[in-house]
Amino acid sequence: MNFGKALLLLFLILNISAVAQPPGEIENTPEAKAIVRGQIIDADTKQSMEYANISIYNPDDSSLVSGGITDSKGEFVIKQIDFGTYYAEANFIGFNKTRINNIRINSNNRQIDLGIIALEPSTQEIGAVNVVADRSRIEYKIDKKIVNVSQDINAAGGTAVDVLENTPSIEVDIEGNVSLRGSGSFTVLIDGKPSVIEGSDALRQLPAAVIENIEIITNPSAKYDPDGMAGIINVVLKKNVLSGFNGIINAMVGTRDKYRTDLTLNYKTKKTNLFFGADFNDETYYGSGNLYRETYLQDTTRYLISEGTRDFGRNGHRFKGGLDIYLTDLATLTLSGTYGQYGRKGGGESLLHEYTEPANTDVYSVEVENSNREGTYVNTNLNFQQKFNEDGTHKLDALFYYSNSVGDDYEFEDEFFANSNYERTGGYLARVRTIEEEDEDEYRFELDYTKPVGEEGRFEAGLQSRIDREFENYSFNDWDNENNQYIDNPDFSSSQHFKRDIFSAYSTFASNFGSFRYQLGLRGEYVNRSIEHEKADEPAEINRFDVFPTLHLSYEFLNKTQLMTSYSRRIDRPGGRDLDPFPNYYNRYTIRYGNPELEPEYTDSYEVGVMKNWGKSFISLEGFYRVTNNLITQVTELGDDGIFYINTENLNNDYSLGSEIMGNINIDDWLIFNTSFSLYRYRIEGEILGESIDRKSTNYTGRLNTTVKFGPSSRLQLTGYYRGPSVSAQGERSSFFFTNLAYRQDLMEDKLTATIGLRDVFGTMKFERTSTGVDFYDVYKRERESQVLTLTLSYKINNFKMERNGGDGTREMDYDDGGF
């Protein structure tokens, strides 16, 4: 790839130049000017604060001399400062301002290090009432968007999926399936580590109440795994940093069988930090669905009409705990683990009418479908971090990760003969049962090294290995009327062993020239994959080496405008079910089989964005272009027996070109709007069964999140979301719209919070999909349960607040030539 070669060459040149000419050196002459540097952190969490503002002022008239914005480590460097005496102000939205006075610059003191500047959250005591400044619901950074969960009261009592319903770049369908910029291929991380359960299933298991924030990374750097063509969703869990014992308890109850509760506890001392969490959920969502299908075989048209209920539910529980041990001031050892059980159920009762024209078939039946997926999962993490300096910019991280997931998936289909009034008249028209068993182990080893280069640069490198072992057993059972029992059908039963080893190395280099910042990355991966199927003579194997370059650029203006652009190459690897070559029986109308020769998809992703801040508000505009080659495409073909056969092939390419505008607008302290609108052109090219499927669509989504504050302890939030229609390789998808409403009240000096929510206020959450081929036409409609009322209670344990400064909240201190 020409772009990758050019990027690699640029990467090598900049690394050489970084070593040959260390940045930040000052010419030792009387006329040379000075540099002011330092680091800004959150006083409570001790975390570095990216994009905090630092300004240099003339004390005589308070005029602005120069300024800058902190980088990802919270560091800033301001150059070309004339000799003289100044004061500096560090500031960030939602935090008190800190002022450093008496900064004296002369010929003997031209490298000024202000040290670590700690900003405190903006809290003022007014009688017995605490007034706390809110952070923006969405924060925009160089390589990601950060969703602050505490600002989304509509998600109270829900899961990570409910939070993402109101998040730019994210789409959530009627069944809670998440897609990132139109793609369901993304990687889920929890605290930066892989999730045992993948994709939307992982997000459905995480209560919103235990989440600190969610990071949306659409163009990750080479440090991250390249899996998932749309990017990464990283869920950062709450982990209190206050000393002593503290925690939070949440409980939710909703109309028609919806219950959820969770607990988080933390105990920290000078040498250790012990944390524990648990959660439980049992929720059922009711809905309906109907199907209309036409199939064309020679001179006969077969019709199938189905109407009925379509319900689904989730249940399970999870325990998580761990221990941080502070071996020294610079070395930390962390051991953590999670154990959980999960369940997912679905199904319903449908009324079926099947007939043909010319008439030779006219059958009425009642179908009862039930599915139940349940299992257990466990993971353990052992982390070691050694810092080589106080601020942690020079460090070594080591990780060992192990996970195991065991689950069974049961599907039952009973179809009864009926009359035209759908009253059961006899025995079974069809009765089958399928059981899918899975047992998966994953091992991961990582070693990451970070080192500053000169005064502006950062070098990162690492080695990783991923070892995946999975066993799948699929059993298909027919009903034996004579013996009144299920019997195994060997034509549709099979088992396979899936093995995949991935070994990778990466390197990134980041630095800046004044306000221009860049980060280059390169990752290489070797993959060895083998599938041993009991019905195959030889295993299906793939051995390949891939290269994944990344590039991130940004330019920051003093007027709080930021310009960013990035590139990354991604991969989407097929799963075990996509690779299984033997048929899986869905129902008597549909059979699915995989393809062991399936190759990964590769995506080249380009982005450019600009963001403008003013006061507590901001607006951003992003543009993106994504090209996917080797597109894994699901192909539906009608057999001569009238059964639909679904296969998976590498057939097509698709292209997405679009833009997204997002704004967080504070009209006043009591009224906040968070809105976004995305528009992109989607194009798919290729052939299916010899027929061209070149298709285009203009896709768009819009959302508006409005928060009204009635006082410091009460607020109302209204959310609206609209998704426009789209196309697929063999069909189209209709638009849909929904609104959510929530009210939150803080009680007992903010120790207790009560939230009442109403989901899908107007009952508009409906979905329709149309599929077409040369010999079939298919329309499926689905409606989700609407107007779900929920009540969530949250109680904070030992929720003390540190005393803050009065007045305007500005903290002042003097500079003493050695920081402060």
Image (spheres, rainbow, N blue to C red):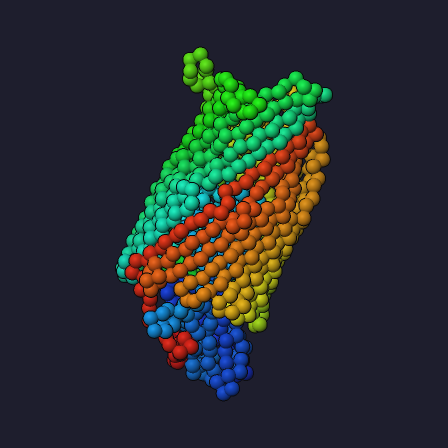
- In the foreground, 382 or 711: 711
For image coordinates 53% across by 37% down, the residue present is 288
Which residue is at the far front?
Answer: 421
Left or right relative to 652: residue 278 = left
Image coords of residue 641 (percent x, y):
62, 20
> Could you tell whether 750 is left or right of 697 in the image?
left
- Towards the viewer: 555 or 362: 362
Q: Position of residue 462 (x, y in %)?
A: 46, 51
Reply above or below: 358 against 769.
above
Residue furthest to the bottom in view is: 60
In the foreground, 350 or 35? 350
Quadrant placement of the C terminus: bottom left
Q: Does 419 appear above or below 61? A: above
| Percent x, y of residue 690 | 71, 30
* Residue drawn at the location 46% of the way across and 31% of the way down: 371
User: As displayed, is residue 304 above or below residue 712?
Assistant: above
* Residue 563 placement, left or right of 446: right
